[in-house]
C-alpha cells in the first residue's frame, strides 16, 4: 500500500510539473509559430486602413476622389447616373460599380500593404528567422459577408525549417455588397425610367432602408442603410429633370 501511495504521489507531482511547463512555455512557442504569426500580423496591420477606405468610399458614392459629384452635408456624392439636360433620362457613370469600388479600395490600401509586409519581415527577423519577403500586389473582392483583401507576396521564413507564403488574406465583415447591388438596381431604374420606387424595394428587402432626397435643380440624393449592420452607401443621380418652375410627381 505504501508503494502504491508513493507511485500515485509521483504521478501527481509529474502531472503538476508538466502542467506548469505547458502553462509557462506554450505561450512562447505559440507566439513563434510561423504558420499563424505572419497572417495575424498582416491582418492587424491592414484592418484599420481597410475600414478607413470603405468608410470614405461609402460616403462618396464609391470613389475616393469623385470627379462628377453633388455636395451634400459636406460630402462629395458621386453622380452614378447623370445627364445635364432636362427631360432626358440619365446615363450610368459607373456601370461596373462593384469592380470600380474594389479597384478604389485596392488603390487606397496598397501603400499600407507594402508597409505591413516590410514590417512583417522585420518582426520575423527579430524572432530569429531568416526572412525573404517581397510584395507583389493587392486584390480586393466584395462578397455577401465581407470585404476580402488579398496581399500577394513571395515570402519565406527559415528557422530549423522553412515556411513559404504566396498571399495573406485579410477579411473585414461587411454588408456593403448588398448596398452596392441595390445601388445598381436603382441606377438601372434611373437610366430607364428617370426615377425609382424605393418603397417597393424596401418591401422586398426589409433589412434595407432607402432614402431618396430630391434637390432643387433635379438631382436626387440616395442614402442606403443596412439596418442590421448599420452601414451606409450614398450617391447622387440626375435623371428626367425638369427646368426651374416646373413640378413633377415623380
Image (cartoon, grey):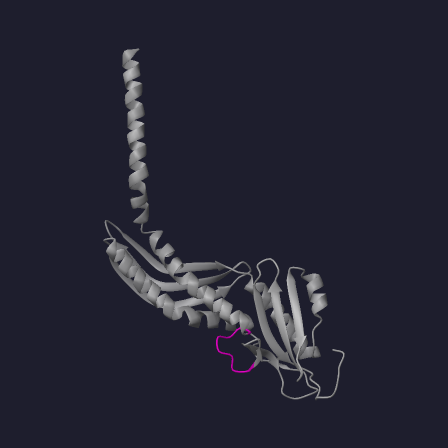
Spot the residue most to the top.
1
In the picture, which quadrant includes the C terminus? bottom right
Query: In the displayed structure, does residue 4 sit left or right of residue 104?
Result: left
Spot the residue most to the front.
73
Secondary structure predominantly adopted by residues drawn in magenta: loop
Q: Residue at x 70, y 76 (%)?
A: 195
Residue span colored magenta: 61-69
Q: Is residue 70 above or below residue 230?
A: below
Query: In the displayed structure, does residue 95 sit left or right of residue 133?
Result: right
Q: Residue at x 61, y 65 (%)?
A: 225
On the image, the x and y values in percent for residue 179 come to: 59, 66
| Residue 40 is inside the magenta segment | no
Residue 109 sits in which quadrant?
Answer: bottom left
For the residue pair 180 and 52, the one nearer the viewer reads as 52
Q: Residue at x 32, y 44 (%)?
A: 27
In the picture, which quadrant includes the N terminus? top left
For the residue pair 226 and 91, the one nearer the viewer reads as 226
Amino acid at each position: 500500500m505504501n508503494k502504491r501511495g508513493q507511485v500515485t504521489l509521483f504521478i501527481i507531482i509529474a502531472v503538476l510539473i508538466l502542467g506548469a511547463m505547458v502553462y509557462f512555455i506554450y505561450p512562447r512557442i505559440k507566439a513563434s509559430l510561423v504558420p499563424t504569426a505572419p497572417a495575424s500580423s498582416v491582418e492587424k496591420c491592414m484592418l484599420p486602413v481597410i475600414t478607413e477606405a470603405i468608410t470614405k468610399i461609402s460616403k462618396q458614392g464609391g470613389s475616393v476622389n469623385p470627379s462628377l459629384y453633388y455636395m451634400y452635408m459636406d460630402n462629395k456624392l458621386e453622380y452614378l447616373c447623370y445627364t445635364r439636360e432636362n427631360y432626358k433620362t440619365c446615363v450610368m457613370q459607373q456601370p461596373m460599380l462593384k469592380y470600380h469600388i474594389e479597384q478604389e479600395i485596392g488603390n487606397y490600401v496598397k501603400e499600407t500593404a507594402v508597409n505591413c509586409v516590410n514590417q512583417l519581415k522585420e518582426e520575423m527577423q527579430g524572432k530569429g528567422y531568416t526572412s525573404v519577403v517581397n510584395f507583389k500586389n493587392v486584390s480586393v473582392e466584395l462578397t455577401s459577408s465581407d470585404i476580402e483583401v488579398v496581399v500577394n507576396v513571395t515570402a519565406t521564413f527559415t528557422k530549423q525549417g522553412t515556411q513559404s507564403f504566396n498571399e495573406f488574406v485579410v477579411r473585414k465583415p461587411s454588408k456593403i455588397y448588398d448596398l452596392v447591388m441595390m445601388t445598381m438596381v436603382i441606377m438601372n431604374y434611373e437610366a430607364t425610367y428617370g426615377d425609382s420606387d424605393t418603397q417597393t424595394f424596401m418591401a422586398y428587402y426589409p433589412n434595407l432602408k432607402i432614402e431618396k432626397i430630391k434637390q432643387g435643380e433635379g438631382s436626387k440624393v440616395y442614402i442606403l442603410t443596412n439596418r442590421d449592420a448599420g452601414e451606409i452607401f450614398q450617391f447622387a443621380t440626375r435623371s428626367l429633370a425638369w427646368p426651374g418652375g416646373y413640378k413633377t410627381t415623380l
